[in-house]
Image (cartoon, rainbow, N blue to C red):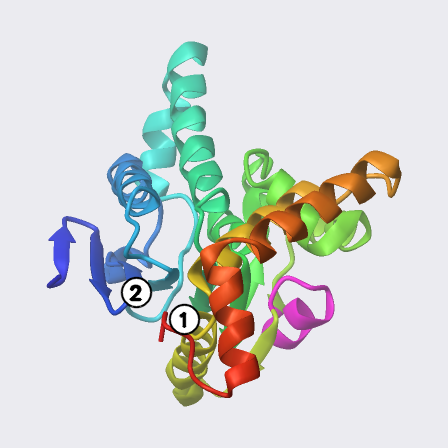
Amino acid sequence: MADEKTAPLTVSVADGLARVVMDRPRRHNAFDDTLIDALADAFEALAGRTDVRCMTLAGAGKSFSAGADLDWMKRSAEYAFDENLAEARRLAGMIRRLDTLPMPTIALVQGAAIGGGVGLVAACDIALAAEVAVFSFSEVKLGIIPSVISPYVLRAIGERAAGRYVLSGERFDAAEALRIGLVHAVLPADGLGAAGEELTNAILANGPEAVAAAKRLIADVAGQPIDGSLIEETARRIAEIRRGAEGREGVGAFLDKRKPNWL
């Protein structure tokens, strides 16, 4: 389909790939209620599409996302507790929807990712960053905390790294983001798009059902004790997918030295 522009967001889908681009460059793609709702709606719509097998998330302009919009934060500070809680739930729900999308998600971080912007990066399955990208959990500098993004951040970088950067609020560069596990690769700014395309092509070459099942497997197995029930569940899953049409086609194509039918 052609690009669809809803105020702060552009969404396009072609050949199995969805591209979601935050489009508030003058505001450095900072969150306000409109952008949060637009992202939540886009993720929800993509979750129900069987023709989408991979998604990239990017920001227009110089920044990936500067976190919370200052005007929005100022308004929120005047809200009563219940209104504040409702706003926080909107943001939390949007990031949770991103985290639970059935297809692989890739963050392409071309510039600054601050506060909640880092949460978007951490909630994606894969993150690629330009060398010029910078990151910060800046909330403590404003007297607040990165609460709703914390589950995804801690999963990505662990308690030790979070203990430094969440508490200090200091900025760190792409090389440090790579070292602590926030991103998977650091590239020259002019090579970020090509690297993202190469990665999406690799994902789209794989069995679509297998990729979706593998994503569910990672989420379900991570952090679980390696006991009898987990071993049995993993055995059941591979047995089930091997006997499916896609599994039989993939193995058959490999043995016959031909391309599988999903290509």
Q: Amino acid at mark 1?
A: Leu
Figure check: 188 above or below 67:
below
Q: Nearer the viewer, residue 60 or 234?
A: 234
Q: Secondary structure at mark 1?
A: helix
| Residue 127 is a magenta residue | no
* Nearest to N terminus: mark 2 or mark 1: 2
Relative side of 180 to 192, left or right: right
Residue that carries the numbered disc 1 in the rendered image: 204
Residue 24 location in percent, x, y? 24, 56
Residue plotted at (69% across, 64% down): 181
Q: Residue at x 71, y 55 (%)?
A: 157
Determine whether 68 is above or below 263 in the image.
above
Above or below — where is 242 with respect to 81?
Answer: below
Along the viewing direction, whichever of 255 and 191 lies nearer the viewer: 255
Span highlighted in magenta in the image: 173-183
Q: What residue would you read off at disc 2?
A: 16
Residue 183's image quarter? Answer: bottom right
- Picture coordinates of residue 159, whole percent (x, y): 79, 47
Q: What element does badge 2 sit on?
A: loop
